[in-house]
Image (cartoon, rainbow, N blue to C red):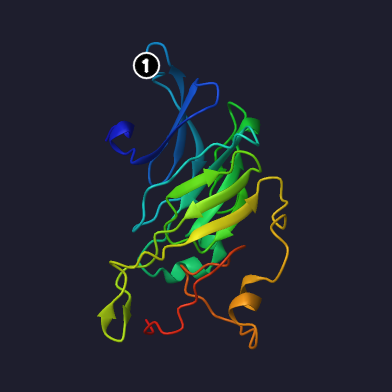
């Protein structure tokens, strides 16, 4: 099967417009691109590999403007509720950053499960990713779980409360957020309860919705 028929998401251009990036369920590729002619070189390089899973198979590939040479790769869960995502070594439900600027022409591709910087773990399906243009903060929007019910009523179809998540900065200064009480201290000021989250209710540096009344699954 030709590679082009396997590409399913992740089209991005380098800042100079000379490199095109795209992905399959398993790999991230780069091609030399001629913007004037609108064509890519026949040969390609594999930048990131070993990220295949069922379920959510698209890979968003934003490039950082604040940290040139860094590409972000979002890998979703393998199922609606993915138990394997509880184990970090699977690479499921993770957002990682890779320094492709220092990847030599003959270098082996990065292995998604062990290389790069893990920015977040427990993201069920964060397809929308953006870098704040001034501060460089990394944000995602989450596509949360399907088939959720409360008191026998479906609550996932028309529920607008999808997460907007902040994941820190690519210079590792993730704690440069607004000072003050942490989210749990605001929401649960008297109890400070420890919550065991479902895989898609990830730890955040922001507000997290805790599904107290969701039916057990």
Q: Is residue 108 above or below residue 87?
A: above
Q: Residue at x 51, y 76 (%)?
A: 197
The answer to whether residue 50 of the structure is visible from this angle is: no
Closest to the observer, 131 or 122: 131
Left or right: 51 as drawn, with respect to 63:
left
Outermost residue toward the top? 36
> SS for tag 1?
loop
Q: Quadrant of the N terminus?
A: top left
Quadrant of residue 132 in the image?
A: top right
Is 123 placed above or below 151 here? above
At 55% across and 26% down in the image, what residue appears?
Answer: 15
Percent position (x, y) of residue 193? 61, 85
Please say whether residue 90 is visible from this viewpoint: yes
Residue depicted at 56% across the width and 64% down the height: 88
Occupied quadrant, residue 145: bottom left
Between 215 and 5, the residue placed more toward the observer is 215
Q: Residue at x 41, y 18 (%)?
A: 41
- Point out residue 115 in the picture as x, y percentages from the top left corner: 61, 48
> Which quadrant would residue 6 be assigned to in this image?
top left
Residue 48 on image: x %, y %: 51, 41
Label 1 crowd bin: few (<14), some (14–19), many (20+), radius 10 Å: few
Q: Is residue 82 above or below residue 25?
A: below
Q: Which residue is mark 1?
A: 38
């Amino acid at each position: 099967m030709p590679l082009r028929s396997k590409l399913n998401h992740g089209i991005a251009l380098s800042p100079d417009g000379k490199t095109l990036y795209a992905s399959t369920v398993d790999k991230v590729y780069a091609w030399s691109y001629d913007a004037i002619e609108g064509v890519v070189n026949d040969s390609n390089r594999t930048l990131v590999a070993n990220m295949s899973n069922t379920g959510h198979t698209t890979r968003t590939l934003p490039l950082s403007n604040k940290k040139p040479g860094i590409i972000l790769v979002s890998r979703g869960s393998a199922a609606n509720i993915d138990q394997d995502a509880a184990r970090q070594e699977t690479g499921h439900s993770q957002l990682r950053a890779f320094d492709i600027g220092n990847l030599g022409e003959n270098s082996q591709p990065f292995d998604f499960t062990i290389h790069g910087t893990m920015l977040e773990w427990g993201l069920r399906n964060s397809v929308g990713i953006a870098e704040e243009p001034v501060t460089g903060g990394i944000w995602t929007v989450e596509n949360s779980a399907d088939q959720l019910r409360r008191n026998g009523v479906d609550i996932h179809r028309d529920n607008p409360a999808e997460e907007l998540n902040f994941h820190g900065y690519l210079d590792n200064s993730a704690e440069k957020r607004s000072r003050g009480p942490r989210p749990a201290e605001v929401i649960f000021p008297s109890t400070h309860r420890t919550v065991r989250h479902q895989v898609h209710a990830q730890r955040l540096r922001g507000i997290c919705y805790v599904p107290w009344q969701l039916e057990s699954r």
